[in-house]
Image (cartoon, rainbow, N blue to C red):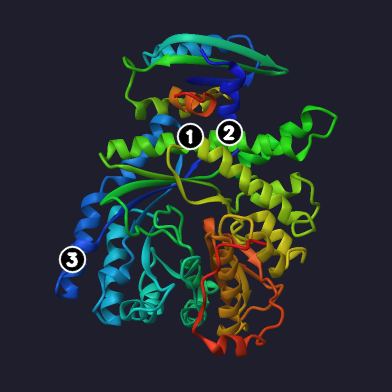
């Protein structure tokens, strides 16, 4: 028999502290679905997804019932569609998006990622067509998510593509004005996008992966927050930050172990290889499931106050250390996410005006992803959005890490107004953007930002 | 692993073991602890002769509603995975 305190700690993690498996994502290679005609390609895509994923949702539910741990999202990631649809025209790309959406609906999953292209070193004709088709493709679907990798530490940043994505994001938001511009929430712009990643909207099944694979994303900011609170309540003497880092590390170990166990059970039941565990702290809008809350527990009274970046750095690193030790194959984005709308405490900080865009950007330089689920005024122009993307991509490129931008210019709303996207996507006040319209000359140059040097690190 | 938690009262253990009998659950190991008003039982159980899992889960929900107790069933491997370095 195990120690009773260990049993009760585990029970509490699951029952009271929101430990769950955030996403089980099936990666499916679609390259062999390519046919001469777009119609036949779409048919093959649907058939292949349905064939492999028809048991995904029921198996996740069975494993979840057997182990008593919930699997919140069941998802699919596919080969970036630019590779599958190369040579087709924009209307055909929209048809592929529809086929993906229909397949996703048929198998009962939440989201499907992979309406994507890599353009970091230049834009191929296929990638350009996919980007042109993006507004219509996302408007015509409900479950399909899109991502574009515009930069990498190896090739630099494709600034023409960055400018294009600024315009696409504006168009997506304006086309979905009745839902607060939600269309833009299904698109992420990346630097150093991981090829295997279970988290939306940036999940893809990139090159060098299995034919079909199961990847898992764990979560549990609530578990970390409660563990820190218990540590602080333990003694009257204040622990050092290194001791808090140790608590986070151990908690991340537990959370990751749980996710990997569930993921491996799902992959075994489906007779598929197991890919990676994304060791992440992904918040939800639910109270007690927030990364922002951890920052407050660790000593800043307002999120965004000086010290916030240092705390995120400690948190992100400790999560990775605990997670990588727990898992046989950590991968994906792995770290702490700070998606503003999806985190009640971060959203509150924006409302109270303590977390400006610039501080958020600074925090993303040491966290796992980037500017995520950030709602800005609808009046911010496409060029300024492009420049915001460029800044974030530069952070990723120089630091050899993944960075991403998922920004929503909410039509008809101004700074301080409120927008709600519902469910896991949450809600937030609109974050003010300073210096709007003052980056046009920079963005006008286009071309490329060259790849960074690998020596002389300062 | 079956965990039962609730306000301490006479008949707590009888209620939980009654549930196990009703669903043909064999108790392999058992420990209990009491903190303040709350009484906790941790039971390592064998379900191989018991009712199918779905039926058991429905039974658990009903039991929790009827008796103002929290009975939670989780796989033993979860506890091993989250607490032990070597699997």
Q: Earlier in the sequence, mark 1 or mark 3?
A: 3
On the same chain, marks 2 and 1? The answer is: yes
What mark, if any, has residue A13 been given in the picture? 2
Above or below: residue B77 compared with residue A396: above
On the same chain, marks 3 and 2? The answer is: yes
As helix, strand or loop, the secondary structure at mark 2 comes to: helix
Residue A215 visible in the current orientation? yes
How far apart, in angstroms, are the residues tagged by discs 3 and 2?
44 Å
> Could you tell me which residue is drawn at 34 percent across and 46 percent down?
A214
What mark, if any, has residue A195 been given in the picture? none
Residue A409 position by quadrant: bottom right
The reply to whether callout 3 and callout 2 are in contact (CB within 8 Å) is no
Q: Earlier in the sequence, mark 2 or mark 1?
A: 2
Q: For mark 1, what is the residue?
A: A258
Above or below: residue B60 compared with residue A242: above
Residue reaching furthest right?
A: A236
As helix, strand or loop, the secondary structure at mark 3 comes to: helix
Q: Could you tell me residue A285's position as x and y percent?
A: 60, 54
> Could you tell me which residue is drawn at 37 percent across and 36 percent down?
A264
Q: Nearer the viewer, mark 1 or mark 3?
A: 1
Is the residue marked by circle 2 packed among few (<14), some (14-19), or many (20+) residues within 10 Å? many
Q: Could you tell me residue A232's position as x and y percent?
A: 77, 34
Q: For mark 3, what is the residue?
A: A43
Q: Could you tell me residue A311's position as x and y percent?
A: 72, 50
Above or below: residue B20 compared with residue A416: above
How far apart, in angstroms, are the residues tagged by discs 2 and 1?
11 Å
> Could you tell whether A336 is left or right of A61 in the image?
right
């Amino acid at each position: 028999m195990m120690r009773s305190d260990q049993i009760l700690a585990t029970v509490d993690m699951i029952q009271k502290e929101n430990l769950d498996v955030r996403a089980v994502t099936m990666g499916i290679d679609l390259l062999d679905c390519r046919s001469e005609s777009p119609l036949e390609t779409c048919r093959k895509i649907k058939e292949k997804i349905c064939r492999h994923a028809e048991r995904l949702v029921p198996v996740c539910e069975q494993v979840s019932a057997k182990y008593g741990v919930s699997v919140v999202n069941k998802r699919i990631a596919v080969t970036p569609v630019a590779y599958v649809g190369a040579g087709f025209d924009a209307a055909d790309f929209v048809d592929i998006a529809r086929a993906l959406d229909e397949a996703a609906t048929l198998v009962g999953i939440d989201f499907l990622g992979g309406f994507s292209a890599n353009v970091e070193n230049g834009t191929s004709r296929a990638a350009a067509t996919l980007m042109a088709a993006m507004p219509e493709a996302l408007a015509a679907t409900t479950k399909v998510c899109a991502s574009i990798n515009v930069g990498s530490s190896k090739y630099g940043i494709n600034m023409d593509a960055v400018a294009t994505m600024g315009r696409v994001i504006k168009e997506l938001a304006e086309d979905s004005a009745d839902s607060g511009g939600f269309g833009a929430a299904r698109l992420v712009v990346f630097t150093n996008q991981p090829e295997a990643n279970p988290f939306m909207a940036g999940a893809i099944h990139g090159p060098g992966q299995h034919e079909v694979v199961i990847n898992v994303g764990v979560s549990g900011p609530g578990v970390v927050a409660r563990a820190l609170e218990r540590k602080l309540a333990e003694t009257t003497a204040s622990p050092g930050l290194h001791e808090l880092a140790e608590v986070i590390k151990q908690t991340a170990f537990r959370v990751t172990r749980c996710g990997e166990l569930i993921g491996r059970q799902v992959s075994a039941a489906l007779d598929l290889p197991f890919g990676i565990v994304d060791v992440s702290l992904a918040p939800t809008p639910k109270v007690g499931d927030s990364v922002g809350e951890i920052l407050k527990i660790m000593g800043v009274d307002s999120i965004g106050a000086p010290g916030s970046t240092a705390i995120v750095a400690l948190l992100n690193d400790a999560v990775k250390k605990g997670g990588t030790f727990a898992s046989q194959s950590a991968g994906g984005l792995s770290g702490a996410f700070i998606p503003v709308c999806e985190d009640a405490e971060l959203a509150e900080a924006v409302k109270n005006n303590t977390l400006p865009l610039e501080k958020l950007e600074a925090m993303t330089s040491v966290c796992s992803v980037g500017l995520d689920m950030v709602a800005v005024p609808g009046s911010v122009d496409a060029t300024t959005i492009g420049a915001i993307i460029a800044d974030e991509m530069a952070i990723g490129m120089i630091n050899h890490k993944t960075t991403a931008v998922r920004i929503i210019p909410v039509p008809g709303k101004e700074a301080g107004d409120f927008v709600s996207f519902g469910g896991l996507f949450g809600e937030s006040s609109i974050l003010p953007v300073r210096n709007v319209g003052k980056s046009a000359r920079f963005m006008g140059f286009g071309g490329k930002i060259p790849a960074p040097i690998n020596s002389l690190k300062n | 692993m079956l965990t039962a938690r609730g306000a301490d009262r006479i008949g707590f253990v009888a209620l939980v073991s009654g549930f196990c009998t009703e669903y043909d659950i064999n108790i392999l190991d058992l420990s209990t602890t009491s903190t303040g008003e709350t009484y906790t039982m941790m039971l390592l159980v064998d379900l191989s002769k018991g009712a199918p899992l779905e039926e058991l889960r429905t039974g658990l929900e009903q039991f929790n509603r009827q008796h103002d107790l929290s009975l939670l069933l989780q796989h033993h491997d979860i506890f091993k995975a989250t607490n032990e370095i070597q699997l």
